[in-house]
Image (cartoon, helix red, strand yellow):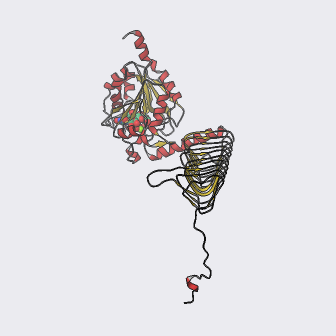
Amino acid sequence: MGDETLKSQESRLEIIVLAAGQGSRMRSSKPKVLHLLAGRALLDHVFDTARSLNPDAIHVVVGHGAGAVKETLDTGDVSFHHQDQQLGTGHAVGCALPSCHPEATVLVLFGDVPLMSRATLLRLLEQVSQGPAMLAAHLDDPRGYGRVLRDGAGNFSAVVEDGDAGHDQRAIKEINTGVLAARAGLLTDLLNAVNNDNAQGEYYLPDTLALAVEGGTTVSIVVTEDPLEICGINDRGQLEALERALQRRLADALLNAGVALADRQRVDVRGDLQCGSDVEIDVNVVFEGRVVLGDGVRVGPNCLVKDAVIGAGTDIQAFCHIEGASIGTGCRIGPYARLRPGTRLAETARIGNFVETKNAVLGPGSKANHLAYLGDTQIGAKSNVGAGTITCNYDGVDKHPTRLGDGVFVGSNSTLVAPVTVGDHTFVAAGSVVTDDIPEESLAVGRARQRNISGWKPPGRRED
Ligand code: UD1
Ligand code: MG
């Protein structure tokens, strides 16, 4: 290998993500790394961070849940390595290491530690030219973690696992986060020398670091101060606690950015939320996927907003369920409205209580204020859909469109049987069943005539 190739391989970064553990403490049929934190799989968070470092390769070591991981996550750029038996973190790294270039820097991440930050990992990677580097943290309650042992000069000497630690060692508050980086070739040599002579009968990855020191190689310790980024998830209690802590952090960021939250403890962001200025969010609002709220948008209490863009000045009143919708400026939605995917509202449109829309386009100023279903529907400007109007868009096999022009007035309790087109400035009489197209500027009456039967008496008042 020429000098140049060698040099380029030295800057090569390969990331190994360990995710073969069963996660039995979650008591779930789902693999642990697929459980959601802020709306995304734990492993997805780790892949995101890994990708942010622009590595040359991402390896993931998986066990039983491999199929589910492949099916659920976007893993086109990830190579999978199977660890059939979980013999320890050292053994797990050994499953992927033969695929890494010996001169590459290997960074080991855990699939169940979702919030590790790019900045901290960059600090760790800076040390690798000197020798292996490990990430440590100080915890008030270090129980369960491996403790960092330093020599008299304060240099790294070993990690002792909780189960193997003596009384004095258990009192140490500096812990191993599990994240480490080293040259692949060195790590391979060190792993070959690791044995499983310990409390758990496992091949411990951190033992490679002690072996490095014994062989005269310095191990750098990088310390992180952020308590969230080192949190590992083993059970549902820890997942809930990390979710709450992360949501609190996201809420604080929204407040700092000028968003008026009624209660920072009662808003959940499970995805990406962008807010303009003077946005107000009331209690118990959940945002999912990508949501954009324009300037001055108000979201009332108890709403779910998913994958939606909401224009400036729009007022979302209490108890709305909005998904896959694009809402213009100055609209009023709810209370109790359900906007389903494909809903597009132009400026100043109104959707009121108990109205469901799906694949429905409303022009400027159009309204459906009460109790209606608008599916596969296009409505022009300034039309009014009365209470109880239903578009019959589905014949049991296919979906059909309903088209309403501008300035249409649909009387209450009308049924529009699609496919049907209602021309501009038409008026549909209340209670009509509309099966035929209506030309513009006309009145459609599609109902039986009222008959009054004089002298009729109810059964109790008959004389016979
Ligand atoms: C590990 C560290 C400990 C550290 C702690 C930080 C070891 C021996 N101990 O302990 O020093 O303080 O993390 O959270 O490394 N895994 C596999 N295959 C295996 C075993 C584990 O893929 O055979 C994966 C797990 O899925 C998990 C990760 O490795 O993602 C860590 O394993 P875990 O059993 O949780 O290690 P800890 O006991 O927490
Ligand atoms: Mg763990």
Report the image quarter containing ligand 2.
top left
Q: Quadrant of the N terminus?
A: top left
In the displayed structure, 109 sits above or below 460; it is above
Question: Which residue corresponds to the image point at 68% horizontal and 40% vertical from the top-left?
Answer: 295
Quadrant of the image containing the C terminus = bottom right
- Residue 122, position in %: x, y? 51, 25
Question: How many numbered dots are placed on residues in this image?
Answer: 0
Q: Residue furthest top?
A: 2
**Foreground: 363 or 69?**
363
Q: Image check: 65 left or right of 354? A: left
**In the image, is 230 to the left or to the right of 432?**
left
Residue 117 versus residue 213: which sits nearer the camera? 117
* Residue at horizontal 65 percent and vertical 53 percent from the top: 408
Task: Report which quarter residue 346 is drawn in.
Answer: top right
Q: In front here: 445 or 130? A: 445
> What residue is at 62 percent from the left and 62 percent from the top?
430
* Residue 5 shows in this picture: yes
Image coordinates for residue 422, horizontal then vertical, percent = 60, 52
Q: Position of residue 264 (x, y in %)?
A: 62, 45
* Residue 397 point in image, percent of width and height: 43, 52
The relative height of residue 130 versus residue 298 in the rendered view (above or below) is above
- Whether residue 283 sits left or right of residue 114 in the image: it is right
Above or below — where is 175 with respect to 3?
below
Q: Decide if residue 166 is in sight here.
A: no
